[in-house]
Amino acid sequence: MADTAISVAAPDAVHEEAGLFGFTRAQALAFGVLVAFVLVSPFFLYPVFLMKVLCFALFACAFNLLIGYVGLLSFGHAAFFGMGGYIAGHTAKVWGLTPEIAIIGGGAVGAVLGLGIGWLAIRRSGIYFAMITLAMAQMVYFFCLQAPFTGGEDGIQQIPRGRLFGLIPLDTDFTLYWLVAAIFLGGFLLVHRVVHSPFGQVMKAVRENEPRATSLGYRTDDYKLLAFVLSAGLAGVAGGTKAMVFGIATLTDVHWNMSGEVVLMTLVGGLGTVFGPVVGAAVIVTMQNYLAEFGAWVTVIQGVIFVACVLAFRRGVVGEIGNLLKVRL
Amino acid sequence: MVDTILETEGLTKEFRGFAAVSDVRLEVARGSIHGLIGPNGAGKTTCFNLLTKFLPPTRGVIRYDGRDITGLKPAEVARLGLVRSFQISAVFPHLTVLENVRLALQRRRGGSFDFWRSEGLLKQFDDRAMALLEDVGLTGYARLTAGQLPYGRKRALEIATTLALDPVMMLLDEPTAGMTHEDVDRIVALVKRVAAGRTVLLVEHNLKVVEGLCDTITVLTRGRVLAQGDYATVSRNPEVQAAYLGTDPAIAGSTQHA
């Protein structure tokens, strides 16, 4: 029966054979552009601003791993991001440990927190999953408000950047930038690898049709939980890195606003695309930065963009470009 | 004594007092094609969900291969070789046709929790997947996304995916639902072919399909077993005729001229 011509195929239907590291040709090209940008931009743009973009980009990539590839909408990712910041800050300031240990610690605690919250949340799906993650994140928020080590309303301030591996001083923004860039690129590639791994295949199967994945013998809850833990851990790394960059860890990063912002970034950039969250984070952070003079209006402008996204280009910036060029990005 | 692979005793499922399936005793002989028929709302699909553990029974026992599986989880039942299909076509629409089948083959690795490895590792299953696709006539579609297949091909893909698990027993939920005549004939031939060496339990609306395919037929109405036997016996049963006449004359018509 294989004789039938493949007439149903739209040009974008035939999947390109994935090449190096699971990148298709278009993706490899886009990745090249991304790396070039990361390498060149600090010579032209303010490094602290760029580091902020990279931290949020990693955060959004972590979030996208869940929503884009497992189909789980977490509305509590600020808990992992903010807690990662507190842990990194505490580790570096109070315990005086090196920055890489502080950041890894932030990621580890994010992952453990994700294990607990994820274990509860994956029992429900859809809106209920989102509500549970939101509720749990609110509990984390109040914990951070009350716990002595977080500094309450003041947060943890004047976190020392220290010396990388105890050797390289990170005092200048330019030096720190390369650490942040390495963490971002590492995290980005990790997410990409997860998506294009044997585990990623099952993850996508769960997104597409969970009962069918179950009927093939996969314990879908276990896969969802691992994805959740990975996502939370990466969010913790992003939060920890951000705390090291700015030298502060505050309640802003555990507040549910932050959970909403990462949803916005991912949607603007393109849900379920590899590069979307990065572009989305860049767009939103840039807006916040350059529109700061409008004060409260930033929120209104963000809201308008969000509505425009949902109404006009649902695939997000990268999703629409990919659709236009008939490639997966 | 017939070698029974799957049997239920007093299988009952109540939804808030309404018994969708009540006191069903089912015995499926090993190696047979067993049909489960009945008018709309007879409890066929509920029965299916109970057997594959997608629903927990209110009462009753399910034994598979001599083992009590009443308390198992759906994924565990699948690992025992009791694999189901779904009424709505169950493919992974945004994955390629090849990936769909490969996902089933991938189960042979055990759990796939290795998120740090490349999916290139899965290429080892490509040959087997292509062979399965050839079996169901989908070779030329391998690199398309499954969502783009026409309906009948999706069902074929679903069967290929199910077969990839090399199931001991297949449960097919209305494999020909919503199909054109040619597609029906193709699926019937396919089921017949793949049933060799396996046991098949299928829910079916289309009595023509059941007639040509099934060794034994169980008729359900209102959650109860009305009759059981081969097609000739069952179709002559006045109660069965009445049950079909009462709800769906068209199907009853096809019973009579069969």
Image (cartoon, coloured by chain):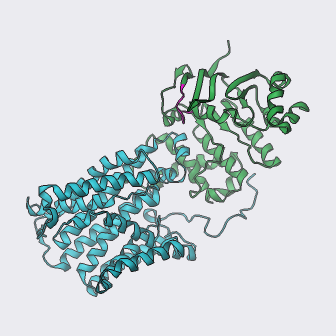
Q: Position of residue B52 (x, y in %)?
A: 57, 33
| Residue in the foreground of this view, choosing between B254 and A64 | B254
Looking at the image, residue B115 lies above or below residue A326: above
Q: Quadrant of residue A182?
A: bottom left
Q: Quadrant of the C terminus of chain B?
A: top right
Q: Colour of chain A?
A: cyan
On screen, residue A21 versus residue A172, left or right, reads right
- Residue placed furthest toward the right: B257
Q: Quadrant of the N terminus of chain B?
A: top right
Looking at the image, residue B144 lies above or below residue B209: below
Give the tally of numbered discs.
0
Looking at the image, residue A17 lies above or below residue A128: below
Which chain is painted in green?
Answer: B
Residue span colored magenta = B52-58
On screen, residue B54 versus residue A187, left or right, reads right
Q: Position of residue B197 (x, y in %)?
A: 67, 29
Q: Position of residue B75 (x, y in %)?
A: 50, 37
Is there any visible trace of residue A275 in the rendered image?
no
On screen, residue B180 versus residue A37, left or right, reads right
Magenta-drawn stretch, dominant element (helix, strand or loop):
loop
Q: Position of residue B64 (x, y in %)?
A: 57, 24
Residue occupying image coordinates x 66% and y 32%: B43
On screen, residue A63 versus residue B71, left or right, reads left
Residue occupying image coordinates x 62% and y 34%: B46
| Residue in the foreground of this view, choosing between B160 and B135 | B160
- Residue placed furthest toward the front: B17
Is there any visible trace of residue B71 in the rendered image?
yes
Looking at the image, residue B41 lies above or below residue A106: above
Residue occupying image coordinates x 61% and y 45%: B161
* In the image, residue A245 lies in the stretch drawn in magenta: no
